[in-house]
Amino acid sequence: MMSEEKAKEDMLLWMDVETTGLDPDHDRILEVEMRCTDMRGVRCVGGFRRVIGLKGRKASVTDGNIKAWRMHCANGLLEAALDGGYTEKATANALEEYVDSLAQSFTLHPAGSNPQFDLDFIGRLCPNLPLHYHRIDMATLRDSLEAAGWDVKPEEETPAVSAHRTDTCLDRDIRQYARIIRHLSDHPVDTSPRKQQGDEHRSSDPPMRRHPDRLDGQQAMNRTNYERNIGMKQTINRISNRVGDWFATLFSLTALLLVPHAIIRPIIGIGLHHWIPIQWLALHAILIILTLCVALAAYIIADRTAPEPPETY
C-alpha cells in the first residue's frame, strides 16, 4: 500500500547566534534567531528570536573571548542580556516548539554564514532538532564566488550599533542569497558540452562584476584602459562642474545687475557718445544669456561624463 503522504517542501532555515566567544563548551549564547524561507530566499513563513539573559549563568571573560565581549558591549546586546532576556530553558523549549512546528510541513535545510558554528551552540540547547544534513553556507558561497573573481562585498556598511546582531546578519545573508539566486536565474549557465574547438575554456558565467585583483593578461590591459578612461572622465567631470559653477555665479551677478543697469544706463549712454543707452542694455542681456548657456553646457558635459556607479554583488 503506497503512502498518500505528500513529500514535504524543501525550505531554508536561516539561523544565527551571537555568543560570548567561540567555544560552545565554555561560552554562552546571548542571542539566537531563526527564519524560514523558501529555497530562493524570497518567501518567509515565520521567525524566532530570543535574547538570553546572563543572570544566573556562568560567563567569564578570557583572552580568547575579550573581543566578543567588547563587540557586544558596543552593539548593545550585552546590556540587553544583563538587563533581562529569557532563560536558557525557556528559550530551548520555545525553539524546539518552533522548529518542530515547521518540520511537520517542511524539510528544513540549515542556512547562514557558517551554520555549523550556530548548530554547535544551538545543539547545547536543543540537541535533537529535526534538520536536514544539506546546508547552505553563505560564508563558503562568498569565498567561492570571490575565488571565481566575483565581487561579493555587502551592499552597504553595517553601523557599529547594529553590527553582529542576529537580525542584521540574517537580513544581509538572506538578501544576498536571494540576489545571487535571482541573478543566476536571469543568466543561466550553459553546462552543455562544447562542440567548437577552443570553447572548452570559454566561460558562460553571467556578466557579474569581476574582482580587479583577479584579472590578468588581456583582461588586465582592458581594465587599465577602462580605468584610464574613467580617470579622464572624472577629470572632465570635475572641470565641467567647476566651469558650470563659475558661470552660474556670473549669470546670477549679471542678472542681479540688470535692474540697476537699466536705471544708470542713461548716464552711461551720455558719457559714451558712440553708445546709446539701449545698446548697453542689449549687451547686458546678451551677456546674461551667454553666461547661462555656458553654465548649462558645462553642467550637461559634467552629467554626460559622470562615471556610473559600479555594480556590486
Image (cartoon, grey):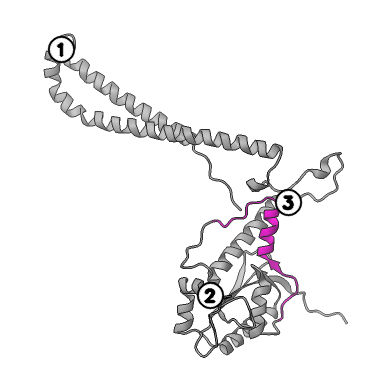
The label nearer to you, 2 versus 3, is 2
In the image, residue 275 lies at what x, y percent?
19, 12
Figure quadrant of residue 123? bottom right
The answer to whether the residue labelled 1 contacts the one labelled 3, judged by CB atoms less than 8 Å apart, is no
Going from the N terminus, do you reach mark 2 or mark 1 first?
A: 2
In the image, residue 11 lies at what x, y percent?
69, 71
Residue 48 appears in the picture as rendered: no
Instruction: Examine the structure image and report whether residue 307 is included in the region drawn in magenta.
Output: no
The answer to whether the residue labelled 2 contacts the one labelled 1, judged by CB atoms less than 8 Å apart, is no
Q: CA distance from mark 2 to mark 3?
A: 46 Å
Please report the bounds of the magenta region as a residue range.
130-155
Q: Residue at x 33, y 32 (%)?
A: 246
Going from the N terminus, do you reach mark 2 or mark 3 first?
A: 2
299 to 271, vertically: above or below? below
Q: Which residue is mark 3?
A: 188
Q: Which residue is mark 1?
A: 272
Image side of residue 91 versus residue 147, left or right: left
